[in-house]
């Protein structure tokens, strides 16, 4: 018994030491031991807990990773809605924000403003009861998000149990903040992925969002996720007398949460702008990405008095920074061949650092864009990351143009297969019409296997490229003969028994997809998911679509002459019929009779046109479209005066702006769910 108590004391001591070291590392930024020493203590604790399971605790520093992958992320309703911030892009709008505050309060804010950096990550809500983390949830639509507790627990910057837990055990509270990736960790992770032959992530924010939705927390734990807290909300009647944003941030730090060291408390709007301008100029010096500054009225009493409008608080605003630019040399222009044979020009650049990422390539869009901007090989060009994500060539520094440079002209033949290129009248794009062109083959098969089409797990772009190079895939129907070549496939690099089994299972499962998914997967020009659904609904099966006349296809609602011609010509291609016959012979779904098509019309949806934008928390956009159509409505891709409703999820973009301009009613996800 004595030995057992001694072991228990040692385990408890190790846990306290490790929690303290995490606090010093993530909150104070003052580590007192090396990573190696920390790892030694973790391993000792793991060993003792394994040997003496009676001392196990779900809040031990060793229990951050769960044993089994989750199967889904259940919905999590926020006790207090997570509002989104209104955005502003210039100084005048910030002063207008101040004017509105002064008018509503009848005076300027008595305790000034807090200025915070707008971390470019994923908003997170953490709920604590009895001093312990009980739930982590994404923002979602602001009312309901995804419960990602299992993944949140892997983030060492987030305390599983607060400091002074006994003292504050009576409090139930919510901590809001941003999950993000430091640039150093992001670059290291991408380097490791490239070494393994895996595609690098585009940027820290996207990889953070994707990581949080990964089903296996063991994989999440390998990613360099971090966290910063920016808001404390008490749930229920019990709360402390902390009446300013700054005092609550200090309290969060006391509890063991990392807060931004760059936050400033200022008295005037001029100081607010000084803060914003400073970090717009100096953001590249930060070890993480930001896309703006957040301005908040510091007094919580004044925040309550100001209230909110629809989805945004009146007491806060986000000042978004201008897109960042860099200058570099355009070494070459290469041409990429897409799935439809579209030739896309790409700028090959002298590597340049921009927003923490090294840019080597950027899109040039099309030949008209190159001609309009007069972009030439050898030019000094201005690179910009649109929305701080996709690199593009924004312009040319003509004063630095080398002598003797010549305008760029498209070649007459395809850079991949040497077939003649065509340039249809009235279009900006050039095309290669050779269906056996290797990049097109890879892109077509990848599209066919993608999630929105046949959803074949294990058949991503890299696997497709490998199979095409090895001669196993030339057309989409070859996918369904891969299981006949198992022994030969096993000889390929990085191709194991388990990987193949998963691939074959994914291929077999794809045979249960509805016919509109198959029709979309065929890759017919201008036929997206909505058009595919309309065609199957109108004709009942792919066979009937294939036999339909041009006039019959054109008569289908929402299908114009251009789409009708594309569909008609596709099925008249003599190389297509044998492929379709092979797919049918393998049991793929050609008939609409295989899926339920009952439409139960509801007055709210009947005959109405919907446009979807942003990310929904309770369903995918495709699922939302299915629900709209199942109730008598119609989902289209663009907003016009004929649009009845725009369903706006998280990070809604230009479609939401267009809806507001045209006065189209905007539905939140919560309102949409009620109507369903």
Image: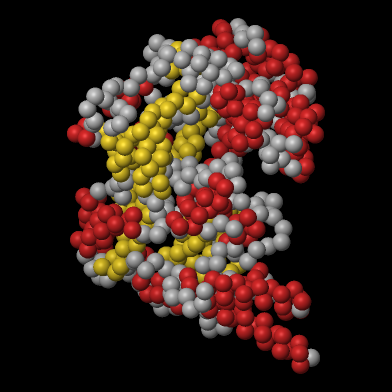
Q: Is residue 37 or residue 201 the one in the foreground?
A: 37
Residue at x 31% of width, y 37% of height: 329
Residue 396 picture quarter: top left
Q: Is residue 269 or residue 193 the one in the foreground?
A: 193
Residue 166 picture quarter: bottom right
Specify whether 9 is left or right of 672.
Answer: right
Q: Is residue 96 or residue 35 the one in the foreground?
A: 35
Specify whether 556 is left or right of 111.
Answer: right
Q: Residue furthest front?
A: 404
Q: Which quadrant of the figure contains the N terminus?
A: bottom right
Q: Where is residue 199? Give x, y as percent.
A: 55, 42
Specify whether 595 is left or right of 550.
Answer: right
Q: Which quadrant of the figure contains the C terminus?
A: top right
Residue at x 66% of width, y 22% of height: 474
Q: Is 435 located above or below residue 321 in the figure?
A: above
Residue 664 picture quarter: top left
Residue 60 shows up from this direction:
yes
Q: Is 6 located above or below residue 230 in the figure?
A: below
């Amino acid at each position: 018994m004595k030995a057992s108590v001694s072991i228990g004391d040692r385990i408890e001591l190790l846990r306290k030491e490790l929690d303290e070291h995490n606090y010093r590392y993530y909150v104070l930024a003052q580590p007192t031991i090396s990573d190696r020493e920390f790892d030694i203590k973790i391993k000792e604790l793991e060993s003792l807990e394994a040997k003496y399971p009676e001392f196990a605790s779900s809040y031990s520093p060793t229990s951050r990773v769960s044993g089994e992958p989750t199967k889904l992320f259940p919905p999590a309703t926020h006790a207090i809605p997570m509002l989104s911030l209104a955005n502003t892009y210039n100084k005048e709008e910030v002063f207008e924000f101040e004017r509105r505050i002064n008018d509503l309060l009848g005076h300027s804010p008595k305790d000034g403003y807090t200025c915070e950096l707008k971390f470019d990550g994923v908003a997170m809500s953490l709920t604590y009861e009895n001093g312990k983390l009980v739930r982590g949830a994404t923002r979602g639509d602001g009312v309901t998000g995804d419960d990602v507790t299992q993944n949140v627990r892997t983030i060492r910057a987030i305390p599983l149990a607060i400091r002074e837990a006994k003292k504050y055990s009576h409090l139930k509270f919510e901590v809001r903040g941003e999950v993000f990736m430091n640039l150093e960790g992001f670059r290291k992770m991408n380097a490791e992925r490239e070494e393994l032959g895996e595609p690098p992530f585009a940027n820290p924010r996207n990889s953070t969002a994707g990581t949080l939705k990964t089903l296996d927390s063991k994989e999440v734990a390998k990613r360099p996720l971090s966290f910063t807290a920016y808001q404390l909300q008490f749930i229920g009647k019990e709360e402390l007398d902390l009446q300013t944003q700054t005092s609550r941030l200090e309290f969060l730090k006391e509890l063991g949460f990392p807060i931004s060291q760059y936050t400033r408390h200022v008295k005037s709007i001029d100081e607010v702008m000084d803060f914003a301008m400073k970090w717009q100029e100096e953001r590249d010096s930060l070890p993480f990405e930001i896309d703006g500054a957040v301005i908040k009225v510091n007094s919580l009493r004044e925040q309550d008095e100001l209230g909110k409008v629809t989805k945004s608080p009146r007491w806060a605003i986000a000042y978004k920074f201008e897109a960042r630019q860099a200058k570099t040399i355009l070494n070459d222009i290469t041409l990429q061949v897409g799935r439809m044979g579209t030739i896309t020009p790409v700028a090959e650049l002298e590597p340049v650092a921009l927003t923490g990422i090294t840019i080597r390539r950027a899109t040039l869009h099309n030949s008209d864009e190159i001609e309009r901007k007069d972009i030439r090989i050898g030019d000094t060009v201005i690179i910009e990351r649109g929305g701080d994500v996709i690199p593009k060539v924004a312009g040319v520094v003509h004063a630095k143009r080398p002598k003797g440079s010549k305008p760029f002209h498209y070649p007459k033949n395809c850079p991949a297969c040497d077939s003649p290129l065509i340039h249809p009248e009235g279009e900006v794009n050039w095309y290669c019409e050779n269906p056996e062109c290797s990049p097109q083959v890879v892109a077509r098969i990848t599209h066919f296997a993608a999630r929105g089409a046949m959803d074949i797990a294990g058949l991503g772009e890299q696997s497709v490229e490998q199979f095409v190079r090895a001669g196993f895939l030339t057309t989409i129907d070859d996918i369904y003969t891969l299981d006949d070549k198992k022994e030969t496939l096993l000889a390929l690099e990085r191709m194991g028994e388990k990987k193949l089994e998963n691939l074959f299972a994914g291929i077999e499962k794809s045979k249960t997809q509805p016919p509109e998914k198959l029709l979309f997967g065929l890759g017919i020009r201008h036929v997206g998911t909505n058009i595919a659904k309309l065609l199957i609904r109108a004709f009942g099966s792919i066979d009937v679509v294939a036999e339909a006349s041009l006039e019959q296809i054109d008569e289908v609602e929402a299908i114009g002459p251009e789409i009708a011609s594309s569909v008609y010509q596709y099925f008249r291609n003599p190389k297509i019929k044998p492929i379709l016959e092979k797919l049918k012979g393998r049991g793929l779904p050609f008939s609409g009779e295989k899926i339920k098509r009952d439409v139960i019309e509801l007055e709210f949806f009947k005959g109405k046109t919907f446009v979807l934008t942003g990310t929904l928390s309770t369903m995918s956009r495709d699922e939302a479209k299915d629900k709209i159509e199942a109730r008598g409505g119609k989902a289209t891709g663009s907003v016009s005066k004929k649009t009845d409703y725009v369903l706006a999820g998280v990070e809604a973009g230009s479609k939401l702006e267009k809806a507001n301009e045209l006065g189209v009613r905007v539905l939140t996800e919560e309102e949409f769910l009620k109507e369903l």
